[in-house]
Image (cartoon, helix red, strand yellow):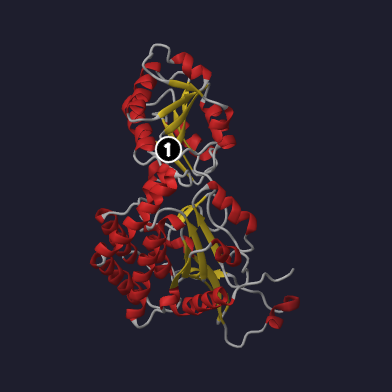
């Protein structure tokens, strides 16, 4: 295979990141935590500068929205304020409080007397993270990368480039002032051409994490010559079972749609059992409509809601069942049974997060076992599918694949492992032809 042509500047940037990763991998936990606390303080001290740069981005983002180049939801995600900056600082502190994921003995085996094998967690190495809109991702990713001992190269969208620059600059300055962590542990690229070069650098990069639109993720997955961790869609479902509680149904469904519609863990399709009370369904959809949600319903659901003339119901098309709106729109479908609901989810879902509302514990457990998704919930909003809420400190993204990490990916998803074998002049020859058996005894951790 022909080696891709890579510019000298990109080559140097990634080589510096590789060198930095080797230093980071050997920092102790106290050193990494000190960097994170210093970064939290630096964010607070530079709030005015961050907001000024973000204001420049918002001006351009609004123009992009008016030209149809940026959705309203993406435009909103660019915005920073004092509360969000404080949350970024707290994220750094919460990540620092987590156990160090690197250097943990995962498994230990005595192969023979004086010959012991240990599986030990270690950083992945150099990670490229590509994201859109949200500049706070710069801090989330960097905090997790520093704590796990990985170097990270960040590529944000042009709609937030000034915010990304100032935030990455603060991180790099904090690293440089630490005197033990290279500032190239975190770096920024800005052009699509640079990304096109990076995604083909299989010998230099260890992992790519794309966060953004379906188009972005699919493009990276198609063109990358490096392992990719992420998800293309967030088509999440809430299933209201016939044994659902009215209050829980209302709380879960409304929260899943209205708490933050413009994110991947917001519900996009509401599945309703045929025996779920029509009155409850009408009241639920009325509250959604009052909040500005557009209702796209199947023919059966429309028939069920004839006694609610105040509801503005649009006919759902086949395309609605496989659409991630990330907006104030919801598709509603009536189903004959829980089996039908699961069949729909497994066919149309994106394997992100799905939930059942029911008082039938046995059915709920069956649902959670049968739905093929990274997160399956019972009587809880899909919005809980989040690294911070899971107690991971933050997340680098959500994986719907079935590799080493699945669901919200925090620190544990940013380490892999190596095998360490401690011997005393042992050779394989002594165990050949039945001369001596290997013990394979577990060593208590």
What's the residue at 47%, 68% (across, down)? 152
**Residue 184 seen:** yes
Residue ID at (66%, 74%): 437
Q: Is residue 198 above or below residue 285?
A: below
Question: Among all residues in the image, which is located at the extreme top?
Answer: 307
Front in this rendered view, residue 445 or 231 = 231
Number of marks in the rendered image: 1
Q: Position of residue 229 (x, y in %)?
A: 54, 57
Point out the image quarter for the C terminus: bottom left
Q: Position of residue 176 (x, y in %)?
A: 36, 79
Quadrant of the image for the N terminus?
A: bottom right
Q: Nearer the viewer, residue 385 or 327?
A: 327
**Mark 1 neighbour density, 10 Å: few (under 14) some (14–19) many (20 or more):** many
x and y percentages locating residue 412 in the rendered image: 45, 62
Q: Is residue 164 above or below residue 343?
A: below
* In the displayed structure image, the side of residue 336 where residue 88 appears, left or right: left
The local secondary structure at tag 1 comes to: loop
- Residue 366 vertical position relative to residue 36 in the rendered view, above or below: above
81 relative position to 329: left or right: left
Could one spot residue 109 in this view of the protein? no
Q: Residue furthest bottom?
A: 425
| Looking at the image, residue 431 lies above or below residue 62 | below
For image coordinates 33% across by 79% down, the residue present is 178
Quarter-wise, where is residue 254 in the image? top left
Q: Position of residue 427 (x, y in %)?
A: 66, 84
Is residue 444 found left or right of 77 in the rendered image?
right
Based on the displayed image, in which of its 4 quarters is residue 305 positioned?
top left
Residue position marked by numbered label 1 in the rendering = 327
């Amino acid at each position: 295979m022909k080696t891709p042509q890579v510019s000298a500047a990109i080559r140097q940037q990634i080589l510096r990141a590789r060198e930095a990763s080797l230093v980071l991998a050997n920092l102790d936990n106290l050193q990494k935590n000190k960097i994170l606390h210093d970064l939290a303080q630096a964010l607070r001290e530079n709030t005015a500068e961050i907001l000024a740069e973000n204001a420049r981005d918002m001006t351009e983002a609004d123009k992009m929205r008016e030209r149809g180049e940026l959705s309203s939801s993406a435009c909103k995600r660019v915005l920073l304020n004092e509360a969000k900056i404080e949350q970024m600082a707290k994220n750094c502190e919460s990540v620092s409080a987590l156990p160090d994921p690197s250097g943990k003995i995962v498994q230990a085996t005595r192969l023979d007397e004086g010959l012991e094998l240990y599986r030990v967690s270690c950083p992945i190495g150099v990670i490229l993270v590509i994201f859109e809109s949200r500049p706070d991702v710069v801090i989330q990713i960097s905090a997790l990368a520093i704590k796990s001992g990985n170097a990270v190269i960040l590529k944000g969208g042009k709609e937030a480039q000034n915010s990304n620059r100032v935030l990455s600059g603060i991180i790099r300055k904090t690293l440089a002032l630490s005197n033990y962590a290279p500032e190239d542990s975190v770096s920024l690229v800005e052009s699509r051409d640079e990304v096109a070069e990076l995604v083909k650098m299989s010998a230099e990069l260890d992992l790519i994490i794309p966060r953004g639109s379906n188009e972005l993720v699919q493009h990276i997955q198609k063109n990358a010559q490096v392992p990719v961790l992420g998800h293309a869609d967030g088509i999440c479902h809430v299933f209201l079972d016939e044994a659902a509680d009215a209050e829980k149904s209302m709380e879960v469904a409304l929260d899943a749609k209205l708490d933050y519609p413009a994110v991947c863990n917001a519900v996009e399709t509401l599945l309703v059992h045929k025996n779920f009370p029509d009155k409850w369904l009408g009241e639920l959809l009325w509250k959604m409509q009052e909040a500005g949600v557009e209702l796209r319903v199947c023919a059966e659901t429309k028939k069920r809601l004839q006694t609610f003339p105040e509801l503005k119901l649009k006919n759902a098309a086949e395309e609605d069942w496989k659409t991630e709106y990330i907006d104030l729109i919801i598709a509603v479908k009536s189903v004959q049974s829980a089996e039908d609901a699961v069949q729909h989810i497994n066919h149309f879902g994106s394997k992100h997060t799905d939930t059942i509302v029911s008082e039938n514990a046995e059915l709920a457990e069956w649902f959670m076992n049968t739905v093929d998704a990274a997160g399956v919930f019972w009587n809880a909003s899909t919005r809980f599918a989040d690294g911070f809420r899971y107690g991971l400190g933050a997340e680098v993204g959500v994986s719907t694949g079935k590799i080493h990490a699945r669901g919200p990916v925090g620190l544990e998803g940013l380490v892999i492992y190596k095998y360490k074998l401690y011997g005393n002049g042992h050779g394989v020859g002594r165990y050949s032809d039945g001369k001596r058996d290997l013990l394979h005894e577990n060593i208590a951790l």
